[in-house]
Amino acid sequence: MPSTLKIGVLAEARYLAQSQPTGLSSKLNELGHEITMIDPQKAFYVMGDDGWFEGLDVIVGRGRSWALLALLGWAETRDVLTINRREAIASVHNKAQMSIAFASAGIPIPQSFFGAIEQLAREIPRSSYPIILKPIFGDNSRGLLVVNSPEEMAKTDWPEPVALAQRYFQTDGYDLKLYGIGDEIWAVRKPSPFNARKDGGESKEGLAPITPELTDLGRRCGRLFGLDLFGVDCIETEAGVQVIEINDYPNYTNVPDANERLADYVVRRAREAR
């Protein structure tokens, strides 16, 4: 019988009421593994004392706080397997750096700009509007703003010195999400936070057909940032699927048997690392 694993789940409190990492933890517990829940912002640590992760085979992290990243990095200095790795999570925290990486790798993204509001108002061609403004360190669609003209841009009271600006596309009310667990990719349609669904017709929400092209796109995005668990936000346009951003360890909404697939992946990686 396979040996029991000791698995640490390092998660910010805000995620504990969501389907992940709760679903993963429950499944791992059901399989007989020892689970240690760790809140990175409600603990006390002495530098050099590795007792908080002693004996753990793997640490699964969900969150982006500096405390969480620091603890993941600490464990990695002692060669503890982490999913996702600290560097991978940090690499998708900064939306400007993320967009630069996508563009440099040839990933299809909306036309994007970066700069102070007054510069964006002066330099972005009128033909590129509407534009969606994003805070550099935004999270969960917070702080996004659609701007319809250079004049409106010039009057925008933006709370940060610079912004990421992307061309905004009207859609049918749905975004396309590519969920990844290692090299496995699923496509799911979900309501767009900025495009209201048009009245009438059947809902498109839920699992969508996966194609070789979408599988390849999802894998390229995950590998670009070194992520094991990830979700790629996309939109479907006349020019094809375009990538908006990538997130570490999402909820895997509408992915079949997500808890089991996540648990299988974590267990396999941990056993390979032993």
Image (cartoon, grey):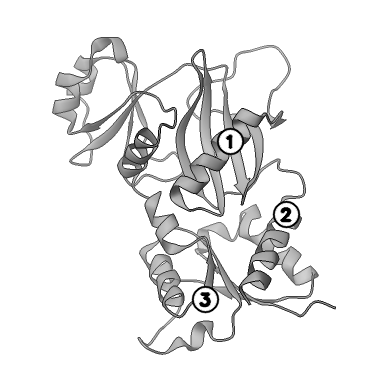
Taking the view exactly as shown, the residue that stands out farthest to the right is 1
**Residue 102, how many percent across, how many down?**
39, 37
Q: Amino acid at mark 3?
A: Val
Residue at mark 1 to residue at mark 3: CA–CA distance: 30 Å
**Which residue: 38% across, 52% down?**
91
What is the crowding at mark 1: few (fewer than 14 residues within 10 Å), some, or many (at least 20)?
Answer: few
Check residue 71 in the rendering and tell me which mark sits there, or answer none.
none
Q: Could you tell me which secondary element the residue under label 2 belongs to? A: helix
Provide the residue designation for mark 2. 261
Provide the residue designation for mark 1. 216
Q: Amino acid at mark 2?
A: Arg
First in residue order: circle 3 vs circle 2: 3
Q: Amino acid at mark 1?
A: Asp
Which of the 4 quarters of the picture holds residue 259? bottom right
What is the crowding at mark 2: few (fewer than 14 residues within 10 Å), some, or many (at least 20)?
Answer: some
**Residue 49, how many percent across, how many down?**
42, 90
| Screen quadrant of the N terminus | bottom right
**Residue 5, how many percent across, how many down?**
69, 77
Query: Of 96 and 36, which appears nearest the observer?
Result: 96
Query: Mark 1 or 2, which is nearer the eye?
Result: 1
Check residue 80 in the rendering and tell me which mark sits there, or answer none.
3
Q: Is residue 143 visible?
A: no
**Residue 108, how many percent across, how many down?**
44, 27
